[in-house]
Amino acid sequence: MKKQKQPRNKTARAGSGQAQTAIAAGGHGSLAAGATPHAGPDDSQTTAQRLRAGMRSPAFQLPFLVFLAGVLTVIASLTIPHEFAFFELGYLFTLSIYDLVLAMLGLSVAIGMAERRGDVVVILFAFLGVIAPMLLFFDPIFSAILQSPLGHELFLIAPIAVMLSGVVLWLPGRLRRYAAPIAAAVVGFSFSLFIGLDDFGIGIQEFAFAAVLGALWILAVPGLMLRPFRGAWLTIPARIIGSWLMVIGVIVTVSLYVPFSPDAPPLPDPNLQDGGMMPDAPGLPPLDPAIEDGLMDAPDQFGTPPSDDGALPSPAFGDNPLLGGGRNREP
């Protein structure tokens, strides 16, 4: 007798064939129940690899060398005893304007986060596009500003520039692309006012050129160093920096409106008589000419003239026992 052939399970073979096809396709579709998904690459290793690759790229190494050259130049200027040239005074002057330095660093973070190189060029062009005409024609432009309503509020330009640079870091990428050049123009306008009013009034070209060069170093170099590492991870740190800048701008603005204490003594005016003291300010009694010439010691009490024998009168303590007097025994 011939043995009967048992029917094969075609449905199971078809199902296994479909599963093999799905696995061979390498898709990330739905897995069967109880299947274990493949583990993705280690995020820490990927971040470390990107960090090493960014540090090895010329886009980071060249700005880093420029940054080191600037730092070494400033250290040499401050540590080596010598007479400062106007060129050195220029970039040291830029570093002394702390609020605008913070505003430039905020814009530098925006440069590091820019999506395209053209956006970086626009920010730098807006910064220099305001500074160049201001320094070339400072006297007529500044006279026109003083005659305008802006002339009474010029002291608010620097705090506004700091706050604008902080606001830029809070905006999304699409809005930051247009707001960053505006903030750069305001920072450049404020910086040009500082240069024009502090170049000793004679328009020294070396001083102004070095000051602008130092500002470009602060504005561009840190951002260019940051660009090889740009990504979504920069959003939170940029907003933290932006919050600090906005708070600093508010503090500086409030400090400009804080009135002086009414109880503070008046400041001396060297243009007035009586040793530069105000006429209504309390002054010391006049000294004896012998005391001024050093022939006689000054008494402890300037209001009581010395006696004829040269002995100082004893102070009257009254009946206060805390000052050495006796008790009042009268009823």
Image (tube, grey):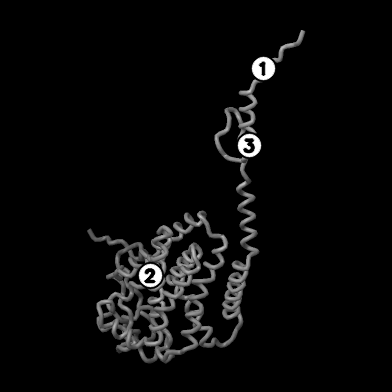
Q: Residue 148, how many percent across, how many down?
A: 25, 80
Real-space Cα separation, disc 2 to disc 1, in angstroms: 80 Å
Vertical position of residue 129 compared to residue 293: above or below: above
Q: Are marks 1 and 3 in contact (CB under 8 Å)?
A: no
Residue identified by numbered label 1:
7
Q: Earlier in the sequence, mark 1 or mark 3?
A: 1
Q: Amino acid at mark 1?
A: Pro
Mark 3 sits on what residue? 23
Q: CA distance from mark 1 to mark 3?
A: 28 Å
* Closest to the observer, 14 or 301: 14
| Any part of residue 184 in sight | yes
Secondary structure of the residue carrying numbered label 2: helix
The residue beneath circle 2 is: 182
Identify the mark nearer the N-term, 3 or 2.
3
On residue 77, which mark appears?
Answer: none
Mark 2 or 1, closer to the camera: 1
What type is the residue that disc 2 sits on?
Ile
First in residue order: circle 2 vs circle 1? 1
Residue 311 at x, y percent in the picture: 39, 82
Is 273 left or right of 92, judged from the image as shown? left
Quadrant where the N terminus lies? top right
State whether residue 110 is above or below residue 280: above
Q: How would you rate the neighbour count of disc 2 (Cα within 10 Å): few for under 14, some for 14-19, many for 20 or more?
A: many
- Residue at 65% from the left image edge and 59% from the top image edge: 52
Kindly identify the residue that appears in the image at 49 percent across and 82 percent down.
90
For the image, the number of numbered tags is 3
